[in-house]
Image (cartoon, rainbow, N blue to C red):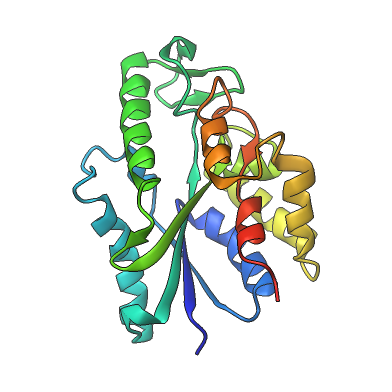
């Protein structure tokens, strides 16, 4: 079989939107999506000492299910929501909701300190993973959708679960049978001034309010992994 690329995303709707698009674009590769049931970089029980283990656990579950060996995996690709994690604390506002409410200029919540703590922890985890080029000997690379997948792909913020599914299905239908157009869509609609260099794209998203704005560097994956 072809070497497998395992993509790791946060939720089921992320997989629902992206997996078939990537499978159709990269027909010569074995593409598989795993989702983590939430943001592992925000989980207080996960730190630098165990986050690689947590990521590999999702790969290992796939290996066991398919009866594969670790050497069958060519690459692990993780796609993060930025969630405004790199903004200055002064843009975190007192709100009326227990949930984090996002705009392109601020995050609001009843408990401001909770947002501050989340951002600090998430920054530390992402910055650490950016120093990792391998996990358990497998090539590792991470990209972002800002401020989350819904924002990047549909230009919608603060969607509930029902609307996430609705938009995910509608979005995939838009590219059904013409999946390669997704790459042009990212470049034309979502990249929004992000540099085409992988290191510079991450430097960019850490500046100012960019991690709240609509951006992505996922387009760079397609540059680094040309379609045959």
133, 79: nearer the viewer: 133
Q: Say which quarter of the image contains residue 152.
A: top right
Which residue is at a point 41% across and 76% down the rendered structure image? 73
Q: Would you identify the image quadrant in which residue 224 lies?
A: bottom right
Q: x and y percent of residue 51 in the render? A: 27, 50
Where is residue 221 shown, x and y percent of the image?
60, 57
Q: Is residue 189 visible?
A: yes
- Is residue 95 at least partly visible in the picture? no
Please give left or right for residue 201 compared with residue 171 in the image: left
Q: So how many labels did they put on this image?
A: 0
Looking at the picture, how far across and down is residue 5, in whole percent? 49, 71
Q: Is residue 179 above or below residue 160?
A: below
Instruction: Please tell me which residue is depicted at 32% across the width and 78% down the height of the picture.
Output: 70
Identified at 63% across, 81% down, the residue is 28
Residue 65, image quadrant = bottom left
Which image quarter holds the C terminus? Answer: bottom right
Q: Nearer the viewer, residue 133 or 10?
A: 133
Task: Give the image location of residue 165, x and y in percent.
Answer: 60, 52
Q: In this view of the protein, which residue sits in the foreground, 6 or 149?
A: 6
The residue furthest bottom is 1
């Amino acid at each position: 079989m072809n070497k497998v690329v395992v993509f790791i995303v946060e939720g089921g709707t992320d997989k629902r939107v992206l997996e078939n698009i990537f499978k159709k674009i990269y027909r010569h590769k074995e593409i598989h999506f795993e989702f983590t049931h939430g943001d592992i970089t925000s989980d207080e029980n996960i730190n630098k000492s165990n986050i690689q283990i947590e990521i590999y656990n999702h790969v290992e579950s796939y290996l066991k299910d398919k009866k594969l060996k670790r050497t069958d995996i060519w690459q692990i690709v993780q796609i993060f929501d930025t969630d405004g994690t790199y903004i200055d604390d002064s843009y975190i506002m007192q709100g009326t909701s227990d949930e984090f409410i996002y705009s392109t200029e601020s995050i609001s919540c009843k408990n401001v300190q909770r947002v501050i703590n989340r951002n600090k922890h998430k920054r530390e985890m992402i910055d650490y993973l950016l120093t990792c080029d391998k996990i358990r000997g497998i090539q590792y690379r991470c990209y972002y959708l800002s401020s989350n997948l819904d924002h990047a792909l549909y230009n919608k913020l603060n969607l509930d679960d029902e609307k996430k599914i609705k938009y995910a299905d509608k979005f995939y239908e838009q590219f059904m049978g013409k999946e390669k157009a997704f790459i042009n869509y990212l470049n034309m609609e979502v990249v929004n001034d992000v540099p085409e260099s992988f290191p510079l794209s991450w430097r960019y998203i850490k500046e100012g309010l960019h991690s709240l704005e609509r951006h992505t560097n996922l387009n760079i994956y397609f540059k680094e992994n040309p379609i045959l």
